[in-house]
Image (cartoon, rainbow, N blue to C red):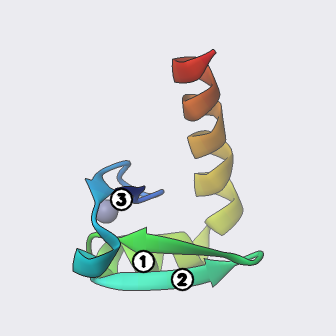
Amino acid sequence: MLVKDPVCRMEIYPRKATGTSDYQGQTYYFCSADCKRAFNKNSAGFLGSMKGEIRGKRA
Ligand SMILES: [Zn+2]
């Protein structure tokens, strides 16, 4: 199963993720340490923009 890196929006396999982060009970996966660092700095910002994108695509 693919998961989405919330920072760069790349789809990755959890097994191949370089880093993970738990935020509000959810685990997020990152393609690189840089993405993980960026997410940890601004979790709400990345998740907010990701939600908007998913809604736009699937509506
Ligand atoms: Zn990334």
- Which residue position is annotated with label 3? 1
> In percent of the image, x 28 and y 61: which residue is there?
12
Query: How far, Cα to Cα, is label 2 from label 3?
Result: 18 Å
In the displayed orientation, state which residue is furthest to the front.
Answer: 1
Tags 2 and 1 in contact by the CB under 8 Å rule?
Answer: yes
Q: Is residue 55 above or below residue 39?
A: above
* Left-right relation of 31 to 37: left
In the rendered structure, which disc, 2 or 1, sits on the residue that comes first in sequence? Answer: 2
Q: Is mark 3 within 8 Å of ligand 1?
A: no
Q: What's the CA distance linking mark 1 and mark 3?
A: 20 Å
Q: Residue at x 58, y 55 (%)?
A: 46
Q: Do labels 2 and 3 touch, CB within 8 Å?
A: no
Crowdedness of circle 2 by 10 Å Cα count: few (<14), some, many (20+)? some
Three-letter residue code for mark 1: Lys
What x and y, as percent, mark residue 9?
A: 38, 48
Say which mark, if any, is on residue 36.
1
Look at the image and tell me in which quarter the N terminus lies. Answer: bottom left
Q: Quadrant of ligand 1?
A: bottom left
Question: Between tags 2 and 3, which lies in front?
Answer: 3
Which dot marks residue 11? none
Q: Which residue is pictured at 55% across the width and 31% down the height?
A: 53
- Left or right relative to 41: residue 5: left
Look at label 3 and name its amino acid: Met
First-in-chain label (2 vs 3)? 3
Q: Position of residue 18 (x, y in %)?
A: 27, 83
Residue bearing the label numbered 2:
21
